[in-house]
Image: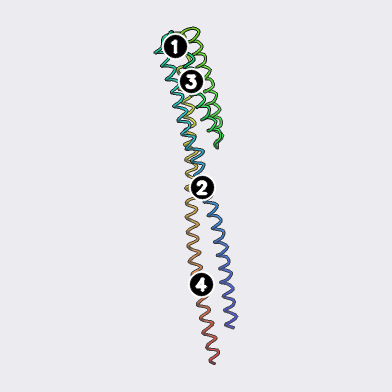
Amino acid sequence: MRFAYSVKQKMKIAVLLFCIMACTILIRFLEDKSVKSMNKSFVSLYNDRLIPATDLFYIAEYVDQKRSLVEEVFYSSTTQTFNEADLKQKLDRINVSIDSLIKDYEKTFLVKQEKLKITELKAWLAGHNRIEDRLLNAASVQGLEKARMMYQTFGRNAPGEIIQKLSELMRIQRQVGEELTKDTAFMVSGNKIYSSFQLVLAILIGILIVGIVFTSNVVKISNDKFNLN
């Protein structure tokens, strides 16, 4: 009778151990999934937020460089010293760099709001380039004085509008980055919970092992007594 009872108890313990093993495997699976998600978030934070934000900063610098070049030439040159080809070459070189940064930015993951803002930014950049062409043409054909008047009328504010669009994109970058950080923090807290569960399961396994050993000893002692009798 005691032997049958012992077998029954061992079966219960075996079932519990199996359940614990299944839970351990499940927790391990969830941990691996969480780690992969965290890694994906960190990579996205770097490739889709940090690097593009740096690119936006460089675009702003290039726009300011173009403004400085135009103002330096328009307000420090005379009709005799004005070199349209040289200024055009410098502006075109900067425009190529800006276009390259924009293309790199568009290759990253963009939320819906970013897609709208980048479209607006490209339109403003294209409009600014047309304004520069008109100013250069006016300076070459009508003289620097006419070009200066045109610049005061509609050319001076264009870089500021572009900087404003860049600021809006940077603001979106910050918001999305904060969301990614919150998601990562949530996943880290989830991993802590998984670790706590694993600790509890390890304790249960220890208790069950002690129970098995104790049960085996009881059975052995009972059998010894039976043999003595």
Mark nearest the camera among 2 and 4 is 2
Question: If you read the primary sequence from the N terminus, does the residue marked by circle 2 or circle 1 appear first?
Answer: 2
Question: If you read the primary sequence from the N terminus, does the residue marked by circle 2 or circle 3 appear first?
Answer: 2
In percent of width and height, residue 58 lies at 46, 29
Mark 1: secondary structure: loop
Please report the residue visible at 50 percent of the width from the left and 50 percent of the height from the top.
187
Alpha carbon separation for disc pair 3 and 1: 15 Å
What residue is pinned by disc 1? Answer: 82
In this rendering, is residue 40 above or below 164?
A: below
Q: Tell me, for residue 39, which label it has, or none.
A: 2
In this rendering, is residue 70 above or below 196?
A: above
What residue is pinned by disc 4? Answer: 209
> In the orientation shown, which residue stands out farthest toward the left?
76
Mark 2: secondary structure: helix
Alpha carbon separation for disc pair 2 and 1: 55 Å
Q: Tell me, for residue 91, which label it has, or none.
A: 3
Question: If you read the primary sequence from the N terminus, does the residue marked by circle 4 or circle 1 appear first?
Answer: 1
The foreground one among 82 and 165 is 82
In percent of width and height, residue 112 lies at 56, 34
User: Mark 1, residues whose alpha carbon is within 10 Å: few (<14), some, or many (≥20)?
Assistant: some
Please report the residue visible at 45 percent of the width from the left and 27 percent of the height from the top.
60
Mark 3: secondary structure: helix
Q: Pointers 4 and 3 in contact (CB under 8 A)?
A: no
Mark nearest the camera among 4 and 3 is 3
For residue 160, side relative to residue 118 (left or right): left
> In the orientation shown, which residue stands out farthest toward the top?
142
Q: Pointers 4 and 1 in contact (CB under 8 A)?
A: no
The foreground one among 114 and 134 is 134
Mark 4: secondary structure: helix
